[in-house]
Amino acid sequence: MKILTTVKKVVDVELNIKVENGAIVEDGLQYVMNAWDENAVEASVQLQEHYGSETTLVSIGAGEDNDKIIRKGFAMGIAKGIQIDDSSLARADSFIFARVLQKVYEKGNYDLVITGKQAQDTDNGQTGIILAEYLGLPCVSNVVSIETLDERHIRVTRLGDTGKEILELELPAVVTVSDSINVPRLPAMRGIMMAKKKSIEVMDLNALGTSVDEVGSAAPRSEIVEYMTSKTRQAGKKFEGDVAEITSRVVYLLANEARVL
Amino acid sequence: MAKVLVVADIRQGELKSSTAELLSKARAIGAQTAVVAIGADIESLIPALVNAGSDIQYIADDPGLELFSASSYTSCVVDAARQFGANLIWFGFSESGKAVAPRVATRLDASCATDITDIILSGDKVEVIRPATANKVVQRVVVNAERLVAVVRAGAFEAKAVAGTLNVVRLSPPARDLKAVIKQIVSDASGDIDLADAKIVVSVGRGAKDEAGVDLIRELANDLKAGFGSSRAMVDAGFMAHNKQVGQTGKIVAPDLYMAIGISGAIQHLAGMNGSKVILAVNKDPEAPIFNVADYGIVGDLFEVVPILRREIKKIRG
Ligand SMILES: Cc1cc2nc3c(=O)[nH]c(=O)nc-3n(C[C@H](O)[C@H](O)[C@H](O)COP(=O)(O)OP(=O)(O)OC[C@H]3O[C@@H](n4cnc5c(N)ncnc54)[C@H](O)[C@@H]3O)c2cc1C
Ligand SMILES: Nc1ncnc2c1ncn2[C@@H]1O[C@H](COP(=O)(O)O)[C@@H](O)[C@H]1O
């Protein structure tokens, strides 16, 4: 089974993010592998270990940090890496990313695509599902387990609105994974050393056999025109001391000051 | 003229409050309204769909639609959207909405925005407001496409009781998806109050330690007729069901009162609850980050605090 795993470079959400004049201040930001893509990588590597699947990772992005996250994928056990680096994609929306991923897929004859359920920067949760639509493949999102049934079928569990939904999928297929699917491994030293020497296949749209027109990167369906700071909450009244006394005081305030009891 | 198609959120045969909220917003912006309801045995919901404020009800009622299937549901929504000529298609916040919205958008050449908190129409221009990056920033997004499919955050719009008119259009059942076959749903809906609808949500974190701790806090939730939520730590540890998880990967809630008991306040948890009107935190660590967002904080051992909380609340609520 050939697996394609998608991995995005995202801003580290644990750090402070400043907004000025409608834009995010680049200074002081750090970039990491999207957390849900770490789960996608882990799921792919586990399939590789158990069933001898062949794993390839693709990341659309630029810069040194992007190189770093692809190498992190190698260190976790991914066999091959593809990077799509094209300046026309700087303001791409999910539909454009999905078109580019479609082109990558079509070059490779894959059986299964595993994406993260969501990117931590956009919080969109769309790209994998749109990719499946473009490819005309079955797709299950928010997946928490993947089992292979035979050469052509997998069984997946997704977290739905009323419980765990168990589905059987005909391959090729696309799944988007939840963070509940696994705990991503920490790369071992040997893996990290080996990852440094691996080569990454870097392509622009042209080399990928497509164009700005075909992927639509000149005309996104939507554009972020402004960033604003989110309403930050102020720390309120914190009580320490005699537990009985402060608890009764807080209940009084909830009822009479906040009026929510 | 704007034409809004709202996708009814039906769970266990009941219409969720988001349907009326979205239809109210649609009426408030002067749009024509329609609703699409998908499921098995849903005839009886038609009056509720009218009361929620829809002027056309597209009904896809078929035994094959009993279990959620993203592709069948997509076909129904696309069918209704085409018949109605909708330019705005709105889902309430749900896992099925999040799965179906991008599919519908792709098929209708629409733009897709998830997790929106507001939508602004001026002339032909459509803009949405949405928090992103774990709630750390807010985006203003301009829609260039002719149509927009949006998933709206819980609590973004208020329901106003304005009834619509009865005008039922039946949809033919979609073809079954043979490539992604739903085999079974292992239900974890235990009949308790849904987090998204609750006025008060009480959530338990790792500080509760074990089953006994969880039970203690559940009692508090029961006293208050509150939704009973959880941090991921307690879901991972197997004490709480997945659908109780509050946070970036779980439910996003915005109740009048959110009680975080034994929860540290990791950014992924905050992303699910920091839109709440009032937050109460109980934590034994005075430095716990949850206190940075809490309106009221009690520093103390939850095993001591919660019984007193229950007693004091009973006193004032009777
Ligand atoms: C991609 C990703 C997505 C995630 N999504 C979510 C999500 O949706 N929701 C979510 O919740 N988390 C999510 N997480 C996990 C999150 O980062 C935290 O690990 C998690 O929220 C911690 O849960 P907790 O606060 O219960 O546990 P802890 O962080 O361990 O905190 C326990 C708290 O209890 C306090 N405590 C201990 N004993 C007592 C006592 N006796 N009395 C009072 N207080 C006590 C401690 O002081 C501590 O503050 C996600 C993480 C990642 C990477
Ligand atoms: N630029 C990108 N390169 C590679 N994968 C991506 C990219 N953007 C999105 N994805 C994948 O799509 C998932 C969902 O992204 P999003 O729709 O932005 O929330 C991510 O978890 C990634 O796996």
Image (cartoon, coloured by chain):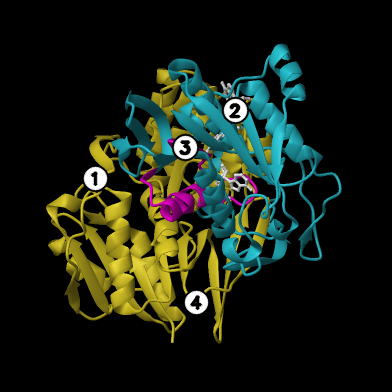
Chain colours: A cyan, B yellow
Label 2 is found on which chain of the structure? A
- Cα–Cα span, label 3 and label 2: 60 Å
- Cα–Cα span, label 3 and label 1: 20 Å
> Which structural element holds mark 2?
helix
Counting from the top left corner in percent of width and height, residue B27 is at 40, 79
Q: Image height check: is A160 above or below B51?
A: above
User: Which dot, 1 or 2, sits closer to the camera?
Assistant: 1
What residue does disc 2 label? A243
- Cα–Cα span, label 4 and label 3: 34 Å
What residue does disc 1 label? B178
What residue does disc 3 label? A110
What residue does disc 4 label? B146
> Which structural element holds mark 4?
loop
- Picture residue at 77% right of the left edge, 44% below the top: A16
Q: Is residue A189 visible?
A: yes
Write down the quadrant of residue B126 in the picture: bottom right
- Cα–Cα span, label 1 and label 2: 60 Å
